Image (cartoon, grey):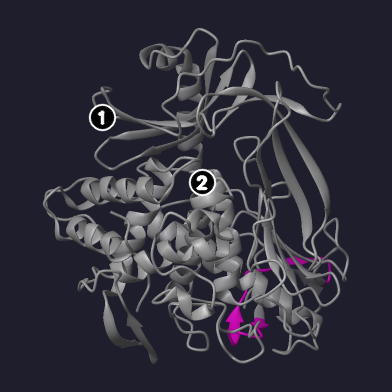
C-alpha cells in the first residue's frame, strides 16, 4: 500500500494486565443504538479530542464548586479525570478525590449532569465519609512509600502504598502493589499489577494492510493514521523499547514465526483494528480518548508464553510462545491487551476481587468485539478467547464465553466465593453475561462455531445482538462503573446504561436483567 508520510490507576490500582493466569493456561460493531425518540448514545458528543480536553479543564476549574455541591468535607478536593457528553447533552464527569492533599484510593466518583446543568445523580466508589484522625503514620515508613487514604472497603484509614518489582514464575514482569494500614501495619490490599493476556503477512490474520511511515530509504511501523502508534522489536529483552521495526520495501513478514517481522505485523494490525473499533463503535479517539497512541513491543523474553498491558509505559507487550515461533499476537489478544488501557482510562477497575474479574472480562468482551469488527476471513469473529494462539497445545481456546467453565477453571455463575478466584477465572461470570445478552441461551452455530449456553436457573434468555450489548457494556464502564464495582454494581450500571440508550420499558433493558439473572447476579 502507499506509505503515509507523515496510571495511572487511581494512583494505586492495577496498572498492568496479562492475558493468561500466571503459570498455565456477526458483523461489524459499528452500531448506532438509538431508538426512535431516544437522543442518548454511548458515543461522545464532543467534536474532537481537543473539545474533550477543554471539557476536562473546565470541569477542573469548577471542581471546588462541585465538591461543595456534593457536600464533601473541607479537606477534600476533586481532580477531573474524564468527561463524556451524550448526544442529549447529559454530561458524565469522572473525578478522583484527595483528602488533606493525599490521594483517596477507592474514593473516585462520577457526576451525571443534565443538559440544563442540573445534577441528576452521582455514582461513588464508596459512600463512606472521607476522614482520618491523623495524616501522620504510626509505623515506620520506607522512603519510597506514599501516604494515601484507603477507602477501598469499610471506614477510610491512613495508609501507606508501596510497590515491589520483580519477575513472576512465567517470566512476566512483576509489580506488586501493597496497601498497608499506617497505624497498625495490617496489609489492607495486595495485588499484582501485571494484568495479563504497508502489506503485512501475518501469522494469524492472513495478508493485511498496514499503515506505515516512509523513513529515509525505507519504511517503519509507525501508524500516522492512529496517533503515531509504533511497533518495536525487543530482541528477547525485557525492558526498554528495543528497536523500531523497519523494512526496505514496505512488505512485512512472511506469515510464519521464523520471520521476526511476522509478530510485529500481527501486533501492529491488532492495534490498528482496536483503535478503529473504538472510533467506529464509541466515537472514542484512542485508548484515553485524547488521540494519543500506545505502542507495541514484540519478542519479549525467551519462550515467554504471555502478553500484557502496562499502564506505566502505556504499551502492549507480546511473548513468542513456548517455541519462540508462536507469538501471542492474535487479533483478539491484541484487542484484549489494548482494552486494559481503556479500562484504566475509564472505570479504573481494581485488579483484584470481583472488580478484577470485571476488568479481565471487559478486555475479553472488547477483544472479541474487535475480532468481529475486523471481519477478517482468516480469523473470523467468535466467542472464543485466544483460539488462534493454541496456548494449551491441543488446539483449544484459552477461554469460552458461552460456557466459561469449559476451560476447567472459570466460573459460569456468580456465588459468594467468585471474588476469591483468580481474576482470569472470576471473569467468566461477566463473559457469560455478555454472551447471553448478545446471543441468548441454548444451542446455536455462529460463523461455523457451535455454542450451547446454559443459565443458572434453567431460564431462556433471548439475545439483543452483540452491537447493542457492547454499547451497553461500554456505556456502563465509562459512565457508571468505578474502581470498586462488583458484580451486583455491574448489574446496576448496565441497567442504567440500557435505560439511557433504549428506554426504561425497552426490550434491551429486560434482556440485561434476564442475562444477569441467567448468571445468578440478582
In front here: 194 or 243? 194
Image height of 145 relative to 132, above or below: below
244 relative to 128 in the view: left or right: right
Q: Which residue is mark 2?
A: 289
Q: Secondary structure at mark 1?
A: loop
Point out the frontmost of discs 1 and 2: 1
Residue at position x 86%, y 57% from top?
239
Q: Which residues are magenta?
A: 200-217
Is 205 contained in the magenta span? yes
**Residue 16 horizontal/vertical position (percent):** 67, 53
Image height of 93 relative to 471, above or below: above
Residue at position x 56%, y 59% from top?
423
Image height of 195 relative to 346, above or below: below
In front here: 215 or 266? 266
Crowding at label 2, few (<14), some or many (≥20) Cα neighbours within 10 Å?
many
Q: Which residue is mark 1?
A: 114
114 relative to 61 in the view: left or right: left
Amino acid at each position: 500500500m502507499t506509505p503515509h508520510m507523515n496510571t495511572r490507576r487511581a494512583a494505586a490500582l492495577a496498572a498492568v494486565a496479562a492475558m493468561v493466569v500466571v503459570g498455565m493456561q456477526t458483523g461489524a460493531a459499528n452500531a448506532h443504538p438509538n431508538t426512535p425518540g431516544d437522543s442518548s448514545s454511548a458515543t461522545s458528543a464532543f467534536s474532537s479530542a481537543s473539545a474533550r480536553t477543554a471539557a476536562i479543564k473546565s470541569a477542573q476549574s469548577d471542581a471546588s464548586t462541585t465538591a461543595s455541591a456534593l457536600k464533601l468535607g473541607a479537606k477534600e478536593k476533586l481532580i477531573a479525570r474524564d468527561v463524556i457528553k451524550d448526544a442529549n447533552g447529559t454530561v458524565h464527569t469522572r473525578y478522583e478525590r484527595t483528602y488533606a492533599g493525599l490521594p483517596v484510593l477507592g474514593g473516585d466518583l462520577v457526576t451525571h449532569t443534565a443538559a440544563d446543568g442540573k445534577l441528576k445523580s452521582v455514582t461513588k466508589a464508596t459512600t463512606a465519609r472521607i476522614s482520618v484522625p491523623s495524616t501522620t503514620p504510626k509505623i515506620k515508613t520506607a522512603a519510597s512509600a506514599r501516604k494515601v487514604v484507603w477507602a477501598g472497603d469499610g471506614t477510610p484509614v491512613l495508609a501507606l502504598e508501596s510497590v515491589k518489582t520483580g519477575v513472576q514464575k512465567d517470566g512476566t514482569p512483576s509489580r506488586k502493589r501493597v496497601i498497608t494500614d499506617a497505624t497498625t501495619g495490617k496489609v489492607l490490599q495486595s495485588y499484582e499489577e501485571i494484568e495479563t493476556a504497508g502489506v503485512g503477512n501475518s501469522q494469524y490474520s492472513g495478508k493485511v494492510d498496514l499503515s506505515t511511515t516512509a523513513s529515509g530509504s525505507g519504511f517503519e511501523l509507525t501508524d500516522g493514521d492512529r496517533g503515531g502508534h509504533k511497533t518495536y522489536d525487543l530482541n528477547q529483552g525485557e525492558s526498554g523499547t528495543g528497536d523500531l521495526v523497519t523494512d526496505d520495501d514496505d512488505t512485512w513478514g512472511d506469515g510464519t514465526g521464523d520471520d521476526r517481522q511476522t509478530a510485529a505485523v500481527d501486533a501492529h494490525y491488532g492495534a490498528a483494528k482496536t483503535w478503529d473499533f473504538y472510533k467506529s463503535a464509541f466515537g472514542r479517539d484512542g485508548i484515553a480518548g485524547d488521540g494519543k497512541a500506545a505502542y507495541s513491543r514484540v519478542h519479549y523474553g525467551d519462550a515467554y508464553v504471555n502478553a500484557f498491558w502496562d499502564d506505566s509505559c502505556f504499551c502492549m507487550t507480546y511473548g513468542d510462545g513456548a517455541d519462540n515461533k508462536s507469538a501471542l499476537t492474535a487479533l483478539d489478544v491484541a484487542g484484549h491487551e489494548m482494552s486494559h488501557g481503556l479500562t484504566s482510562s475509564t472505570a479504573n477497575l481494581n485488579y483484584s476481587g470481583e472488580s478484577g474479574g470485571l476488568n479481565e472480562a471487559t478486555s475479553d468482551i472488547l477483544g472479541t468485539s474487535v475480532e468481529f469488527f475486523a471481519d477478517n476471513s482468516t480469523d473470523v469473529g467468535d466467542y472464543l478467547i485466544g483460539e488462534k494462539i493454541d496456548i494449551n497445545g491441543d488446539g483449544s481456546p484459552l477461554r469460552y464465553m458461552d460456557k466459561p467453565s469449559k476451560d476447567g477453571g472459570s466460573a459460569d455463575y456468580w456465588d459468594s466465593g467468585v471474588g476469591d478466584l483468580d481474576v482470569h477465572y472470576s471473569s467468566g461470570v461477566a463473559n457469560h453475561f455478555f454472551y447471553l445478552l448478545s446471543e441468548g441461551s441454548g444451542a446455536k452455530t455462529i460463523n461455523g462455531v457451535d455454542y450451547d449456553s446454559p443459565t443458572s436457573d434453567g431460564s431462556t434468555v433471548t439475545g439483543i445482538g452483540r452491537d447493542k450489548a457492547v454499547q451497553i457494556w461500554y456505556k456502563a464502564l465509562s459512565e457508571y462503573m468505578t474502581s470498586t464495582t462488583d458484580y451486583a454494581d455491574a448489574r446496576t450500571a448496565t441497567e442504567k446504561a440500557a435505560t439511557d440508550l433504549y428506554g426504561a420499558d425497552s426490550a434491551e433493558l429486560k434482556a440485561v436483567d434476564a442475562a444477569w439473572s441467567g448468571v445468578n447476579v440478582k
